[in-house]
Amino acid sequence: MEVILMNTEHESEHYRYDRTWAEIEEMLDKAERKMNFHETESHLADTQTDKVYHIRNFKALQGVAKALRWVLGDIRIDDPLD
């Protein structure tokens, strides 16, 4: 396992800090649309396997949306890990 430590300027060859607010908001919109798709499909699923697949993706995208909302400064999100 490789551990990457950030220097004091928070720069690394593995990270870039040039995302715009519009790009982050667009990613949030895409995540929420996919999340809604998987929620709908979970209710329409014919098999338990399909239902579990859609619920798993829905829950993962909930975490993505929560993290993106936190990045955008949503005052309702104190900690995206809670």
Image (cartoon, rainbow, N blue to C red):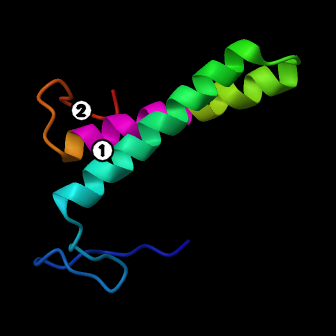
* Quarter of the image where the C terminus is located: top left
On the rendered structure, is 7 left or right of 25?
Answer: left
Residue picked out by circle 1:
68
Q: Nearer the viewer, residue 7 or 76?
A: 76
Tag nearer the camera, 2 or 1: 1
* Quarter of the image where the N terminus is located: bottom right
Q: Residue at x 21, y 28 (%)?
A: 77
Q: Residue at x 50, y 75 (%)?
A: 2
SS at mark 1? helix
Magenta region: 59-69
Q: Residue at x 18, y 79 (%)?
A: 7
Amino acid residing under circle 1: Leu
How far from the left and from the top, in percent, is residue 15? 32, 76
Q: Nearer the viewer, residue 76 or 38?
A: 38
Question: Pointers 2 and 1 in contact (CB under 8 A)?
Answer: no
How far from the left and from the top, in percent, is residue 3? 43, 73
Q: Residue at x 43, y 35 (%)?
A: 32
Residue picked out by circle 2:
79
**For marks 2 and 1 on the same chain, the one whose residue lies earlier in the sequence:** 1
- Secondary structure mostly taken by the magenta-highlighted segment of the chain: helix
How packed is label 1: few (under 14 Cα within 10 Å), some, or many (20 or more)? many
How far from the left and from the top, in percent, is residue 34? 53, 38
Q: Is residue 64 above or below residue 55?
A: below
Q: Nearer the viewer, residue 38 or 49?
A: 38
Amino acid residing under circle 2: Asp
Q: Nearer the viewer, residue 29 or 63?
A: 29
Q: Is residue 30 above or below residue 76?
A: below
> Is residue 62 part of the magenta span, yes or no?
yes
On the rendered structure, is 32 left or right of 49?
Answer: left
SS at mark 2? loop
Q: Is residue 13 above or below residue 24?
A: below
